[in-house]
Amino acid sequence: MADQVLVFEVADEQLADNDPRWDRQVQGLISDLKADVGQVTRGDGPSQPGMKGVPAADIILALGSAGALTAAVEVFKAWLGHGKRSIKIRTSKDGDVTVTGENISEALLSKAIDAAAARKPAS
């Protein structure tokens, strides 16, 4: 797999974007991704009022190998298992892949990330 940069927009329906617990959740997710995947950054920019995960909770992840993809899937699967969380994967202007669920399988999440990675990158 060639280096593919994906933007993961994470959200939690139960917390407002200005809730300190939300920031801790996002920082924890980023820490887990850095430990298991490596090259991860948090997008900066002002979030929109009342909107969680836009864009203050954008997570930019470079997937350079199948092992990085597998590790990212495991981290995101664990993260989705708490509360009412979702992940939108952005790679192009025309479409996103959104994953929401509590008991999502690794296979389904892996397919969603693969589908997003197969799209043309945003220009």
Image (spheres, grey):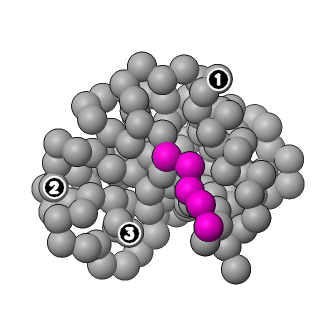
- Tag of residue 52: none
Q: Quadrant of residue 46?
A: bottom left
Q: Main secondary structure of the magenta part?
A: strand
Query: Would residue 61 be visible to someone looking at this image?
Result: yes
> Which residue is disc 3 drawn over?
55
Residue at image point 41% right, 75% down: 44
Instruction: Say whether residue 53 is magenta.
Output: no
x, y (%) of residue 96?
56, 56
Q: Are marks 1 and 3 in contact (CB under 8 Å)?
A: no
SS of the residue under disc 2:
loop
Cα–Cα gap, marks 2 and 3: 13 Å
Residue type at the position of mark 3 = Pro
Direction from residue 12 to residue 55 in the image, left or right = right
Residue type at the position of mark 1 = Ala
Query: Would residue 31 be visible to someone looking at this image?
Result: no
Query: Mark 1 or 3 closer to N-term?
Result: 3
Query: Mark 2 or 3 closer to N-term?
Result: 2
* Image position of 94 with respect to 4: above or below: below
Direction from residue 89 to residue 38 in the image, left or right = right
Q: Quadrant of residue 54?
A: bottom left
Cα–Cα gap, marks 1 and 2: 30 Å
For the record, the magenta segment spans: 94-98
SS of the residue under disc 3:
loop
x, y (%) of residue 55?
38, 69
SS of the residue under disc 1:
helix
The answer to which of 25 and 6 lies nearer the viewer is 6
Classify the position of the C terminus by image quarter: bottom right
> Which residue is disc 2 drawn over?
16
> Which residue is disc 1 drawn over?
107
Residue at image point 16% right, 48% down: 15
